[in-house]
Amino acid sequence: MSSATVSPAVTDRRIRPDHDLVARMALGETAAMEELRARHGRTAYTLAFGILMDAAGAEHAVSEAFLEAYRLAARFTPGDLTVLAWLTSLTRRRAEALAAVRI
């Protein structure tokens, strides 16, 4: 298959693995955060919704988690966790914090 027939999303993922996107976030590139959200936002939302059972709250938790990931990107060490595990951990903490406030 020539590169002309490969979709841009597939090509981008080969060129930019998740940990490279985190490194770009550490340099202040918001587009890298947006790309990670496009890749993993649905998984994060599903997790948050399962905790909160509320669509708006889940979306808020996910937004906060990805903003926290952006702020903490320079501290992320590839090999300690996968990027997805890191993002879901951040999302879970945000969702649980929101759930605690609602009690």
Image (tube, rainbow, N blue to C red):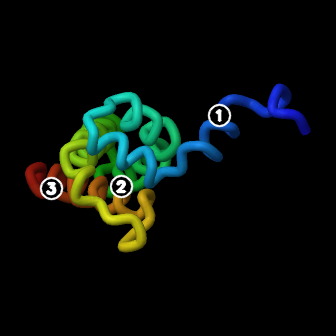
Disc number placed over residue 97 in the picture, else none: 3
Q: Nearer the viewer, residue 36 or 2?
A: 2
| Rendered view: 1 above or below 46 | above
Residue at point 45% right, 49% down?
A: 20
Asked if the residues shown at circle 3 and circle 2 are in contact, with their CB atoms under 8 angstroms apart, the answer is no
| Rendered view: 76 above or below 30 | below
Q: Is residue 78 visible?
A: yes
Q: Which residue is mark 2?
A: 87
> In the structure shown, which secondary structural element does the residue marked by tag 1 occupy?
helix
Estimate the spatial distance between the alpha carbons at disc 1 and disc 3, rounded to whole Å.
Answer: 34 Å
Residue 8, by quadrant, is top right
Direction right: furthest residue: 1
Total numbered badges shown on the rendered structure: 3
Question: Crowding near pointer 3: few (<14 within 10 Å), some, many (20+)?
Answer: few
Q: Which residue is mark 1?
A: 9
> In the structure shown, which secondary structural element does the residue marked by tag 3 occupy?
helix
| Rendered view: 52 above or below 55 | below
Estimate the spatial distance between the alpha carbons at disc 2 and disc 1, rounded to whole Å.
Answer: 20 Å
Disc number placed over residue 42 in the picture, else none: none
Q: Position of residue 103 (x, y in %)?
A: 10, 55
Q: Position of residue 86 (x, y in %)?
A: 35, 61
Estimate the spatial distance between the alpha carbons at disc 3 and disc 2, rounded to whole Å.
Answer: 15 Å
Q: Position of residue 43 (x, y in %)?
A: 48, 50
Query: Please, what is the three-letter code of the amino acid marked with disc 2?
Result: Leu
Query: Please, what is the three-letter code of the amino acid marked with disc 1?
Result: Ala
Q: Position of residue 63 (x, y in %)?
A: 28, 37
Query: Please, what is the three-letter code of the amino acid marked with disc 3?
Result: Ala
Residue at point 27% right, 44% down?
A: 26
Residue at point 19% right, 44% down?
A: 71
Q: Earlier in the sequence, mark 1 or mark 3?
A: 1
